[in-house]
Image: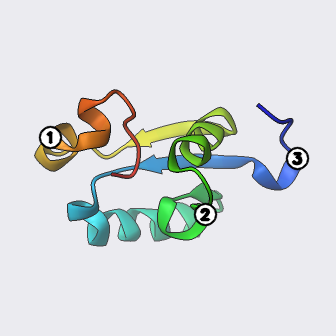
Amino acid sequence: MAESNKSDKHDVMVSYNWGSKETVLKIREQLRGAGLSCWIDVEQMSGSTLEAMSAAVENCSVFLMCYSEGYSQSEACQSGKCGGS
């Protein structure tokens, strides 16, 4: 994988199922209010989904998985590629 630059670093990478998007966006705002930078797919996703999420996980200090029934049933999670599905 290409070397990351400082702008690729985030305090928190948020992984979730889109069925929980409204709740997750509220969590993101709380994290930002606490001064933490967040990676979330609705803002930073570009190019290959798998590569973008892999880079986000590699470049975060905390991986926040917002687990739900929808998350566990998602195609990405079932295939072992859990991310913002």
Q: Residue at x 56, y 37 (%)?
A: 62
Q: Nearer the viewer, residue 34 or 51?
A: 51
Earlier residue among tags 1 and 3: 3
Q: Is residue 73 toward the left or the right of residue 61 in the image?
A: left
Quarter of the rendering occupied by the N terminus: top right
| Residue 54 horizontal/vertical position (percent) | 58, 37
Distance from Cα at disc 3 to Cα at disc 2: 15 Å
Mark 3, secondary structure of its residue? loop
Q: Residue 14 placed where, x, y %?
A: 46, 50
Give the side of residue 34 with respect to residue 71, left or right: right
Quickly name the residue at label 1: 73
Left or right: 15, with 52 as reference point: left
Figure check: 79 above or below 83: above
Residue 71 found in image quarter: top left
Mark 2 closeness class: few <14, some 14–19, many ≥20 residues within 10 Å = few
Q: Earlier in the sequence, mark 3 or mark 2?
A: 3
Query: Please, which residue is most extreme toward the top here?
Result: 80
